[in-house]
Image (cartoon, rainbow, N blue to C red):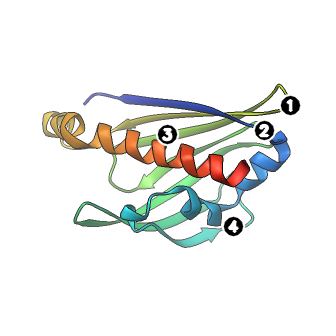
């Protein structure tokens, strides 16, 4: 099974504390997730978000409904946090969010390391659909973040 890595970055003209605060509020995930995923937060425990917080979601990928649970495993306000999937569609999902002060604003970095289940079949599905979907989701996310902060 291959590990796939997706990276994205963008700059917003807002202070790092404001940007981190937005990303630290689980309810804002829906604002930066495409509607076609039918994304819904089921629970956040404990809230406010911190190391050890479990976030449970429901969503739909194509015609497949799924439940997803992530845990915040690293928490370093306002610089970074990491969430990992405990239950969901991936064999592995490790998403690092980093925030760096730069030129009167904040640069946002995302790095997602993920693996699909099902070995060779999962790798084929990645090439045919999942890679493009991850890129599309993060392209939407970029536009949504621009509209939130600009």
Determine the CA span between mark 2 and mark 4: 30 Å
**Residue at image mark 4:** 46
Q: Are marks 3 and 4 in contact (CB under 8 Å)?
A: no
- Pointer 1 and pointer 2: residues touching (CB < 8 Å)? yes
Rendered location of residue 102, percent (x, y): 80, 26
Tell me, yes or no, if residue 138 can be seen here.
yes
- Measured from the top left, where is residue 131 in percent x and y? 31, 37
Q: Is residue 21 left or right of residue 123?
A: right
Camera-side mark, 3 or 2: 2
User: What residue do we see at 16% from left, 35% from top?
Assistant: 124
Q: Reading the chain from its start, which is encountered first: label 3 or label 4?
A: 4
Instruction: Report which quarter residue 25 is drawn in.
Output: bottom right
Is 109 rendered above or below residue 142? above
Q: How many marks?
A: 4
Dot 2 crowding, Cα within 10 Å, few <14, some 14–19, many 20+:
some
The residue labelled by disc 3 is 94
Residue at the image position 78 percent from the left and 53 percent from the top: 21
Residue 134: x %, y % from top left: 38, 42
| Image quadrant in which you'd find residue 136 | top left
Q: Secondary structure at mark 3?
A: strand
- Mark in front: 3 vs 1: 1
Q: Which residue appears at 76% of the width and 47% of the height?
A: 20
**CB atoms of marks 2 and 4 within 8 Å:** no
The residues bearing labels 3 and 2 have C-alpha atoms spaced at a distance of 27 Å
Q: Earlier in the sequence, mark 1 or mark 2?
A: 2
The residue identified by callout 2 is: 13
Q: Which element carries disc 1, helix, strand or loop?
A: loop
Q: CA distance from mark 1 to mark 4?
A: 33 Å
Q: Which residue is mark 1?
A: 104
Q: Which mark is residue 150?
A: none
How far apart marks 3 and 1 lie (CA) works out to: 29 Å
């Amino acid at each position: 099974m291959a590990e796939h890595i997706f990276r994205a970055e963008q700059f917003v003209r807002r202070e790092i504390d404001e940007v981190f605060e937005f990303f630290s509020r689980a309810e804002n995930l829906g604002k930066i997730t495409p509607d076609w995923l039918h994304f819904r937060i089921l629970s956040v425990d404990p809230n406010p978000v911190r190391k050890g917080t479990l976030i449970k979601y429901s969503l739909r990928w194509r015609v497949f409904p799924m439940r997803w649970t992530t845990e915040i495993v690293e928490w370093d306000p306002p610089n970074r946090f990491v969430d990992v999937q405990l239950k969901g569609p991936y064999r592995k999902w490790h998403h690092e969010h980093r925030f760096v002060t730069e030129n009167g604003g904040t640069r946002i970095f995302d790095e997602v390391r993920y693996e699909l289940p099902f070995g060779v079949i999962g790798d084929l599905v990645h090439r045919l659909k999942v890679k493009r979907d991850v890129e599309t989701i993060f392209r939407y996310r970029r536009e949504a973040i621009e509209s939130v902060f600009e």
